[in-house]
Image (tube, rainbow, N blue to C red):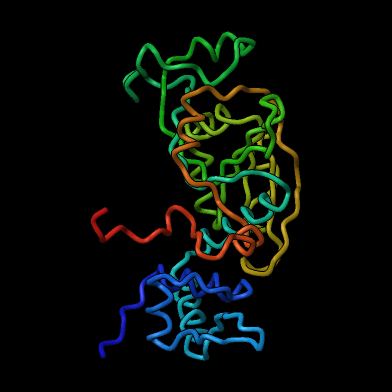
């Protein structure tokens, strides 16, 4: 018998079984895992069936986790750490969204103007200088987040830019248009970097500062300076961008996920005709 090929969908199911009580779903993924002896089926005295990971299954998950850790750069690991902190504080977080924003003082040919039907990101009480600006650029903030609320006025959109090295931070500070785009998309904008790579005085005063004390994987974050608050309203176009993107999920949320209901981006492709 040929051993089944183990894919990321199998690894996802293994992790779900590890985090749950092990109730079986009786689907094709479990057949493959049982055949590969990565899980074992146990029947209680009352006749209830449960799945338990074998030593081989635990070893496969551990190896996959180590490969994932090694593949992530320090910048990415630092971003994941801070995203987890934002999730724990009750915010909805997206990574590396592509959002269009208005900047001031750039040559008109820098970016083609948006269609006439597009809505501004700022509300009607925005300063006239911002409303009159018509130079657009694409912004890709490392972390974009809003509060988990149903009241639009309480959303408090934020941008957090992760900078693991001084060179990366200084490069960002030299691009005024990039920083303007970050500010234009949110009410508060922060730089997050390891302690010691820059002094607070080097960061423009309207940006907040978080610093990481210790290692990327086990250090603690400290707020050195709050960001200057500026109210803004997110329009329909940005809402659509958020709807199309998948927000990050916390480890606790993943642990509570129903067994057999993987995230949308983890569903295996359909191979059978309806």
Instruction: Locate residue 18: give its quadrant.
Output: bottom right
Which residue is rendered at x = 54% and y = 34% of the image? 182
Measured along the vertical axis of the image, is residue 44 above or below residue 20? below
Q: Which is more toward the observer, 53 or 236?
A: 53
Location of residue 52 in the rendering, given as x and y in whole percent from the top left corner: 56, 83
Q: Which is more toward the observer, 251 or 173?
A: 251
Callout count: 0
Instruction: Locate residue 48: give its quadrant.
Output: bottom right
Q: Which is more toward the observer, 36 or 71?
A: 36
Which residue is rendered at x = 54% and y = 45% of the image? 94
Quadrant for the N terminus in the image: bottom left
Report the residue that reaches farthest toward the front.
46
Measured along the vertical axis of the image, is residue 248 above or below residue 16? above
Q: Which is more toward the observer, 148 or 112?
A: 148
Location of residue 135 in the rendering, given as x and y in whole percent from the top left corner: 41, 19
- 171 vs 183, left or right, is left
- 2 vs 6, left or right, is left
Instruction: Locate residue 118: give its quadrant.
Output: top left
Location of residue 270 in the rendering, given as x and y in whole percent from the top left corner: 30, 58
Residue 197 in sight in this render:
no
Which residue is rendered at x = 37% and y = 71% of the image? 28
Measured along the vertical axis of the image, is residue 76 above or below residue 71? above
Residue 118 in sight in this render:
yes
Which residue is rendered at x = 49% and y = 46% of the image? 246
């Amino acid at each position: 018998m040929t051993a089944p090929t183990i894919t990321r969908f199998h690894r996802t199911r293994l992790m779900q079984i590890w985090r749950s009580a092990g109730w079986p779903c009786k689907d094709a993924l479990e057949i493959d895992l049982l055949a590969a002896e990565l899980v074992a089926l146990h029947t209680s005295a009352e006749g209830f069936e449960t799945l338990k990971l074998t030593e081989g299954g635990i070893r496969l998950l551990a190896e996959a986790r180590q490969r994932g850790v090694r593949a992530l750069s320090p910048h990415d690991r630092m971003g994941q750490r801070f995203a987890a902190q934002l999730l724990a504080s009750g915010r909805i977080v997206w990574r590396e969204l592509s959002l269009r924003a208005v900047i001031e003082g750039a040559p008109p040919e820098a970016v083609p103007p948006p269609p006439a039907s597009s809505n501004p990101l700022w509300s009607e009480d925005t300063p006239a200088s911002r409303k009159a600006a018509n130079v657009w650029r694409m912004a890709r903030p490392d972390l974009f987040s809003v509060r988990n609320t149903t009241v639009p006025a309480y959303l408090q959109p934020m941008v957090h830019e992760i900078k693991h090295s001084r060179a990366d931070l200084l490069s960002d500070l030299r691009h005024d248009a990039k920083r303007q785009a970050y500010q234009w998309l949110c009410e508060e904008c922060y730089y997050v970097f390891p302690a010691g790579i820059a002094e607070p005085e080097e960061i423009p005063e309207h940006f907040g500062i978080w610093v990481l004390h210790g290692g990327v994987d086990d250090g603690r974050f400290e707020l050195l300076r709050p960001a200057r608050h500026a109210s803004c309203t997110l329009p329909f176009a940005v809402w659509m961008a958020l709807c199309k993107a998948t927000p990050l999920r916390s480890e606790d949320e993943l642990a509570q996920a129903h067994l057999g209901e993987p995230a949308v981006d983890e569903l295996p492709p359909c191979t059978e005709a309806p």
